[in-house]
Image (cartoon, rainbow, N blue to C red):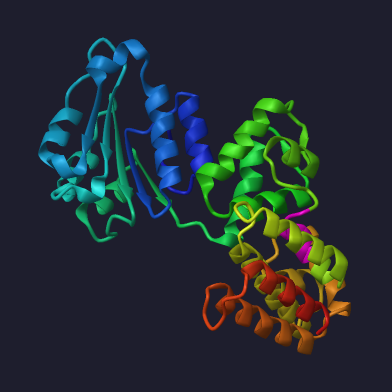
Amino acid sequence: MAKNDNLTALQLISAAQKGNFAPVYILMGEEGYYIDSICEAITQNALTDDERDFNQSTFYGLDSDARVIVNTCKRFPVMAARQLVVVREAQLLDNLDLLHHYVANPLKSTILVVCYKGGNVKATSELMKAAKASADAVVFESKKLTEAGVGPLLQEYVQHKQLKIEGKALAMMKDYVGTDLSRLFGEVDKLALILQPGAEITPEQIERHIGISKDYNNFELVNAVRERNIGKALAIVAYFKKNPKNNPTVLATAILFKTFADLLLLHTARDRSEKGLMDAVGARSPWALRQLTPALRLYNASSCYKSIGYIREFDRASKGIDSRANEYDKLAELVFKIIRS
């Protein structure tokens, strides 16, 4: 594999599945899912089952020594083209920086995978300097996922699975699963087993195979509020009250708050072009913007300010602060106040 520290997780996984490896991988960051996924892809594809006994070594940071790891890396494979050395929980390895001597000049017949979770190896460390300078090392940072980043990552993963996804279906999965990548991608994997390559994931398929209601979810609740459709909005809240485990009010709070914060940004945006409005709210596609703009005619800037205030009051009450009322009853009250604002 050519030196490239800008490869995405899916690109690194795909390369491993095709048998393309780098001699050294430094996998680090706060999002452990990608670190585990890349390491798993390398582990599953670097060696055959018959080769693993003599050519795969796994070390754990708390119980290991960097000098022993380096000596292992310098061994030659036994009846195989390569050997694999995996260092898990590398953030707990006391003398991790000593690996820099090996990383600066690694064996081509060894694949060293260093998994450093919960943060990054210091850029000023000797290890990082050696990794950055080496044409044989790949450094991958797994950044903590934000809510805004879920959509693009989900879209990328769906395409990786040779599928397409409708905008509403994408929003349903984002709202239902949130930033739990393992669960999010697991649901896509489930659909990929059911659907044919090139098929489009629809709300109906999500309802049938994942269990998210296509009519009673946070996406539809926000739509009803944006349209000032009080009957539909209250019906959705009533459904949430009957199914609280799958519909926590904290998700509704976050999505409603973001909706009215975005509407306020659109009202005050100086650049009224489509691109300007998309930039104002961080929309990644015109479709996301089109979900918001009709509500601008129904909620002026003053209504948005009031709605944000109501949402903050509800957030306090739903946590039991100054209120003992049922949180779903309070959510119904919030919806009513917003729509009547």
Q: Quadrant of residue 224?
A: bottom right
x and y, in percent, of residue 84 in the image: 29, 26
**Closer-to-camera residue (197/126):** 197
- The secondary structure that dominates the magenta segment is helix
Let me know if residue 80 is in the magenta part: no
- Residue 78, horizontal then vertical, whole percent: 22, 13
Judge by depth and name the residue closer to the eye, 227 or 63: 227
Query: Is residue 220 in the magenta section?
Result: yes
Numbered range of the magenta stretch: 216-223
Q: Does the rendering let one see residue 289?
A: no
Q: Image point 66% across, 46% down: which residue?
A: 155
317 on left or right of 36: right
Q: Classify residue 99 by image quadrant.
A: top left
Please report the residue visible at 80 percent of the width from the left and 66 percent of the height from the top.
234
Q: Is residue 272 left or right of residue 170?
A: right
Q: Which residue is pictured at 58% across the width and 54% down the height?
A: 178
Quadrant where the C terminus is found in the figure: bottom right
Q: Is residue 17 left or right of residue 152?
A: left
Residue sitting at 77 percent across and 60 percent down? 236
Tell me if residue 145 comes above or below residue 341 in the rendering: above
Q: How many marks?
A: 0
Vertical relation: 280 (above or below) 267: above
Which image quarter is the N terminus in?
top left
Please tell me which residue lies in front, 42 or 92: 92
Relative to 245, is 67 above or below? above
**In x, y percent, where is residue 335?**
75, 73
In the displayed structure, 26 sits above or below 123; it is above
- Asked if residue 166 shows in the view, the reply is yes
Question: Percent from the top left, x then y, of residue 86?
Answer: 28, 33
